[in-house]
Amino acid sequence: MTAGSGGGNKKRQRTGCNTRFSSTSAVIDSCRLEGTVTEASHKPSGLRRTSSSATISGGFNDAASADVVLRLFLEPCPSDSDSESISTVDSFFEDDIQIYLHSDVIRRSKYFSALLSARWQGDSSEGDNSPKIYRLNFGVPLSTGTISTHLTVIQLLYTDDYSGVIENASTALSILPVALELLFEDCVRSCVRFLEAVPWTEEEEKRILSLIPFLREEESRELLDRVSPSKTDSLEEMLHGLIVAAIHNHSNMAFVKAFVAKLLREFSSRDSARRVLERAFEASLKTVKRSLEDYSNPDFRGDHNETEAIQRLNLHTATTNGRHLLWLIERMIELKVADKAVRDWGEQSTFTADLQRAFRDDAWRNIVPGLPVVVLRCTCKLANAVISGSILAARPVRMKLVKEWLPVLIVCKDNVSVLHTHKSLYTELEEIFLKIISTFPLSDAQELLQQCLSFATRNVDDCPHLVTAFNTWFRRADRPPTS
């Protein structure tokens, strides 16, 4: 930017503001150098004089009363070797205009106030008796904006009501860089207040972030609060809150779970998603375990009816949180972050003992008939992720998973009436366990396969997975020992 009355004055520099400004073509047409100044009727609609400006002797671009002649011209950037670059930015407007202003008005801009001060001005009067006329040149760099926007901001010096001009975020973002350039504090505050109150598009947000460094701390605080987290763990706290709300607080649970699942899939940080899901998994697992423990070890010191009600509540709590647990496991497997869940699931000796004790009792059948299916589905999902290679579990982890949960499956087969719709789940889990067993040394596989004899059916042809598992073991065991 070049500005001044013949001297080399300086002002606050601003760069990086690639903006488009509103049209003030009527004013530009009236300010061509080769013509004369038009009447005040060419002022754009929306700008009006207020009571606070009643002392101003004339309006914007009033040559009869003006004591400042300002030349606005486009100043090409040093990198612009091609003259066509000027026309692409401001082709609709004149690139060199002259306007008539009033020094008492434009001093609202600290830039103009400094420029008109005695320090910067020599004797500019055109005769001993004639009033002092200030002649200023102001170069508008292409990087800062257009002449039309500078005209708009200069016109705003003549009013205290900016609402007719600042009508949307795009306009505020166009005006704000020029207001900052001219140190026009009232206009800066109005633009910032408007931006604080309205929503932004993603592109507008990027422009705001580029302008925030030029604002004072108190001006930018609310804008920053909207786009910058106050805590380093805000992302994870938000995700965790969404998960908790999805599985606990919404009657419209299926749709909410689907929406949160989509957010988790598209979340940028898999590590954050892992930590949030593990936290929720641990909480739900803890609730299920505590409920089953309370059910398996009831306190009979109270009234019988009260004890029965508490037992019912424990079973319902276990089943409900078991379903939440299944949803969390599905999300963890989907994101390939279920490693810790598999390890934890294989270290539940107390939990699996409580389940076996509960399933051998008939009391739960009429209360929560779906509890065994929920628990076995959780086991099936995790075990299937192991055999598919989605989760690379070490041999001790695989061993614990089978040793802890194979007895639960056997107890369910022996004591739970298997509905036809759930029969495939039992068969699938049998097959998965047999495949995991096939990954163990022969001595370990020998012990575990003997526990799987309960998988046999009346018709041997109905359990091909069991036949295949034993044939595989015998084939391997029949090989000569390796040295």
Image: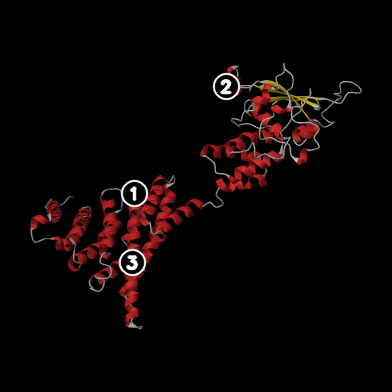
Could you classify mark 3 by the number of other residues whose Cα lies within 10 Å: few (under 14), some (14-19), or many (20 or more)? many
- What residue is disc 1 on? 334
Residue beneath the point at 61% across and 23% down: 90
Residue under label 3: 318
Residue shown at 55%/38% (left/top)? 204
Q: Quadrant of the N terminus?
A: top right
**Number of residues whose C-alpha sits closer than 10 Å to that of mark 2, classed few (under 14), some (14–19) or many (20 or more):** few
* Residue 253: x %, y % from top left: 37, 57
Picture coordinates of residue 201, whole percent (x, y) = 52, 39
Q: Nearer the viewer, mark 3 or mark 1?
A: 3
Secondary structure beneath label 3: helix
What residue is drawn where x is 40% and y is 49%? 264
- Identify the secondary structure beneath mark 1: helix
**Labelled disc at residue 88:** 2
Location of residue 335 with respect to 11 vertically, above or below: below
| Number of marks | 3
Check disc 3 and give the amino acid type: Ala
Amino acid bearing label 2: Thr
Residue at image coords 12%, 60%: 456
- Residue in front for this viewpoint, 101 or 11: 101
Above-or-below relation of 184 to 275: above
Where residue 413 appears, as percent x and y from the top left, is 18, 64
Locate residue 104 relative to residue 422 in the image: left or right.
right
Foreground: disc 2 or disc 3: 2
Mark-to-mark CA distance, 3 and 1: 24 Å
Query: Is disc 3 in contact with disc 1, using a CB cutoff of under 8 Å?
Result: no
* Mark 2 or mark 1, whichever is nearer to me: 2
